[in-house]
C-alpha cells in the first residue's frame, strides 16, 4: 500500500501537468523547467564525501591505460577535487537549469526510479545525468554523468559513474585530430566489502 501511495504521489504532478498544460512554446518550457526542483546531485556527492571522511578506510585509485592498470592510494582531501567533477557545473542552478529537460521512469520490476536530465543544446558541458533511485526509500543507487569538454586541438568526453557508498569511475575519452582515441579509466574505491 505504501508503494502504491508513493507511486501515486510521484506521478500526480506529471498527470496534472499534462492535463492542464498543452502549450509547448519555448518560453513556457523554460518556465516549467525553472519551477521544477532537479535532484540535488551536488548535495548528495557532498554527503558521500562526508561518509568517506568518517570511514577508517583509504581511497584506492586504479588507473587503466592501454590495458595496463596502476594502483595507488589517494588522499581523501585530493579525492574531494576529483569528486567535484560530478557536481560542476551544477545543472540545478538557475543559469543552467533552463537548458535541461527532466524525464522520469519507474521500473516496478527492478524497484527503481530513474531521473534523466538531458541537455537541450550542445553548448553546455554536462550532456546527460541519470540518477537511479531505490523505489522503496528513494535512496541513490547510482549517478551517471556524461560531460563534453571542448578544447582547441581536441575534444574530451568524460563518462562518470558513482555507485553509492562503494566507488566511482571516470572514463575519459580524448580525441585529437588525426590520432586514435585515447581512453583513460580511473576507478576510485573506498569500500570493496560488497
Image (cartoon, rainbow, N blue to C red):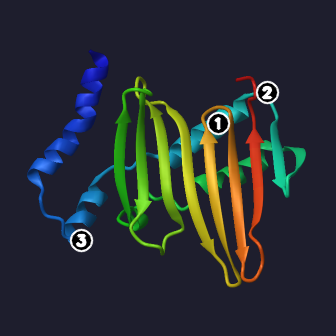
Q: Residue at x 13, y 64 (%)?
A: 23
Q: Residues within 10 Å of mark 3 (few under 14, many from 20)?
A: few
Front position among marks 3 and 1: 3
- What residue does disc 3 label? 26
- Could you say whether the residue bearing mark 1 is in a helix, strand or loop? helix
CA gap, disc 3 and disc 1: 40 Å
Numbered label attached to residue 56: 2
Q: Earlier in the sequence, mark 3 or mark 1?
A: 3
Q: Measured from the top left, where is residue 4 in percent x and y?
A: 26, 22
Q: How far is disc 2 from disc 1 in space, using C-alphas?
A: 12 Å
- Looking at the image, tell me whether mark 3 or mark 2 is earlier in sequence order: 3
| Residue 11 picture location, percent across and down | 24, 37
Quarter of the image for residue 105 reads: top left
Query: From what the image shows, is residue 189 above or below residue 149?
Result: above
Residue at (69% x, 52% y) in the render: 170
The tag earlier along the polypeptide, 2 or 1, is 1
Residue neighbourhood size for the residue with mark 1, other residues' Cα within 10 Å, grouped as few (<14), some (14–19), many (≥20) = few
Amino acid at each position: 500500500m505504501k508503494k502504491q501511495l508513493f507511486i501515486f504521489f510521484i506521478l500526480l504532478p506529471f498527470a496534472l501537468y499534462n492535463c492542464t498544460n498543452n502549450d509547448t512554446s519555448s518560453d513556457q518550457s523554460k518556465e516549467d523547467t525553472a519551477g521544477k526542483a532537479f535532484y540535488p546531485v551536488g548535495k548528495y556527492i557532498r554527503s558521500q564525501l562526508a561518509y568517506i571522511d568518517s570511514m577508517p578506510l583509504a581511497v584506492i585509485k586504479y588507473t587503466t591505460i592501454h590495458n595496463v592498470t596502476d594502483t595507488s592510494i589517494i588522499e581523501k582531501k585530493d579525492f574531494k577535487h576529483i569528486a567535484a567533477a560530478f557536481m560542476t557545473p551544477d545543472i540545478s542552478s538557475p543559469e543552467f537549469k533552463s537548458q535541461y529537460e527532466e524525464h522520469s521512469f519507474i521500473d516496478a520490476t527492478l524497484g527503481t526510479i530513474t531521473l534523466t536530465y538531458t541537455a537541450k543544446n550542445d553548448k553546455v558541458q554536462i550532456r546527460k545525468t541519470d540518477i537511479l533511485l531505490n523505489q522503496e526509500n528513494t535512496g541513490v543507487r547510482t549517478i551517471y554523468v556524461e560531460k563534453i569538454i571542448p578544447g582547441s586541438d581536441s575534444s574530451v568526453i568524460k563518462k562518470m559513474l558513482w555507485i553509492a557508498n562503494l566507488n566511482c569511475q571516470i572514463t575519459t575519452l580524448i580525441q585529437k585530430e588525426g590520432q586514435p582515441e585515447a581512453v583513460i579509466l580511473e576507478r576510485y574505491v573506498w569500500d570493496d566489502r560488497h
